[in-house]
Amino acid sequence: MKATSVLAVLLSCVVICAAAKCSLTGQWKNDLGSNMTISAISEKGIFLGAYLTSVSATNKTILTSPLIGYQQLNGSSTFGFTVKWSFTSSITVFTGQCFIDETGQPTLQTAWLLRSESGDIKDNWSQTRVGYNIFHKLPSKRS
């Protein structure tokens, strides 16, 4: 095998291997300005974190809310997490996948369901919203 062929194979492996390594841990900001922090992922794929939304339909003070989630650890970059809002009776579930974008940065593509509490079963039909968000990883802070 020629040296140029070996180099081409190694370079393509670097690109493929880099794309496969998409860590969820760290700080993220989505397209609406909401902030999320994800802690270390356990050996079972469980992670905890905090979510501070920048958008809300309530007039209550927005508070940082806890999240819990799972990431597949079989080489896949798919994940899901739930946010238990601290300032309202709503719950949001997110599911998505982590990708490495064209600049080499991790990006989370997510879909979500937000469930609000219904005061009456007749209004149940209107209490679930669906949406999509893209999260970009923020640079880590150095001390």
Image (tube, grey):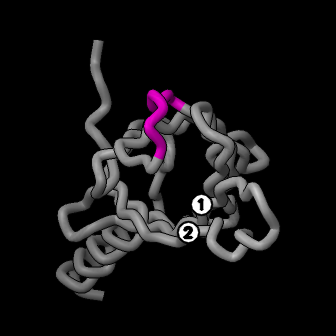
Which residue: 33% across, 53% down?
30
Quadrant of the image for the C terminus? top left
Check the image and name the residue furthest to the top. 143
Quadrant of the image for the N terminus? bottom left
Q: Are marks 1 and 2 in contact (CB under 8 Å)?
A: yes
Query: Could you classify mark 2 by the number of other residues whose Cα lies within 10 Å: few (under 14), some (14-19), or many (20 or more)?
Result: few
Magenta stretch contains residue 40: no
Q: Quadrant of residue 88?
A: top right
Magenta stretch contains residue 61: yes
- Residue bounds of the magenta highlight: 58-64
Question: Disc 1 marks which residue?
Answer: 114
Query: Could you classify mark 1 by the number of other residues whose Cα lies within 10 Å: few (under 14), some (14-19), or many (20 or more)?
Result: some
Q: Position of residue 69 (x, y in %)?
A: 68, 49
**Is residue 34 at all visible to an observer of this figure?**
yes
Q: Which mark is residue 129?
A: 2
Which residue: 45% across, 50% down?
57
Q: Position of residue 33 (x, y in %)?
A: 29, 46
**Is residue 40 at all visible to an observer of this figure?**
no
Secondary structure found at label 2 = strand
Number of numbered discs overlaid on the protein picture: 2
Q: Which is more toward the observer, 92 or 30?
A: 92
Kind of residue indicated by mark 1: Leu
